[in-house]
Amino acid sequence: MGRSSTAMALALVVLAFIECEAVTRYVVGDGRGWTAPPNITAGFYDEWAANKSFEGGDTLEFGYNGTHSLAAVSKEEYDSCAKVSSFADGTNGQGYGYQLPKKVGVYYFICTVDSHCEAGQKLAINVTSTTSAGFTMWSSPSPLTSGAISMVLYTFALFLLGH
């Protein structure tokens, strides 16, 4: 019993030193998704992002409502709605998840379909801080993630009991 208690205590100490960072998933546009007028007005995405605090490692989920594209662009391309190559085209029900780089700065996204960008389908995200390197978990881990963590801890405890 002494070895078991020691192993469990050691496992808890190891867990205490594992650095966990909360990674937030944002659904761009909330219920409206990644869309263009008449579903939104110019400035809609600026207002959506204004009250949020984005960190490096957070994920933006672009759920398409209509036929759209997604392009990560420079400030100049954002301002002029330049027709650049997009990296994610799609229609209703499709989407794309983009993990923000772990670097402070402003990141720009536009839709390159027709005049959607000019009509307001563009987004600027200000990453104000970066999370440190370490073990990453979604803010609400799935049962699979929780199960995997439990299995690693169980295996570690068995390893310690065997030595």
Image (spheres, grey):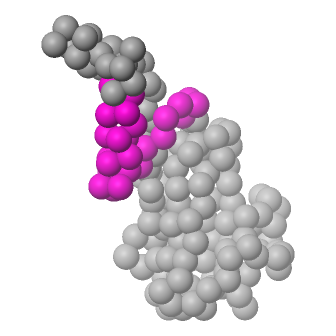
Residue 112 rendering spot, x and y as whole percentages: 73, 81
Q: Is residue 17 above or below residue 152?
A: above
Residue 55 rendering spot, x and y as whole percentages: 53, 42
Q: Is residue 126 above or below residue 95?
A: above
* Quarter of the rendering occupied by the N terminus: top left
Left or right of 49 in this view: 130? right
Q: 3 or 28: nearer the eye? A: 3
Task: Note whether residue 61 is visible.
Answer: yes
> Residue 13 magenta-drawn?
no
Left or right of 99 in this view: 25? left
> Residue 133 magenta-drawn?
yes
Picture residue at 33% right of the left edge, 27% below the top: 158
Residue 16 rendering spot, x and y as whole percentages: 35, 19
* Quarter of the rendering occupied by the C terminus: top left
Picture residue at 53% right of the left edge, 31% below the top: 134
Q: What segment is highlighted magenta in the picture?
A: 131-157
Q: 96 or 120: nearer the eye? A: 96
Picture residue at 38% right of the left edge, 46% below the top: 148
Residue 69 rendering spot, x and y as whole percentages: 67, 81
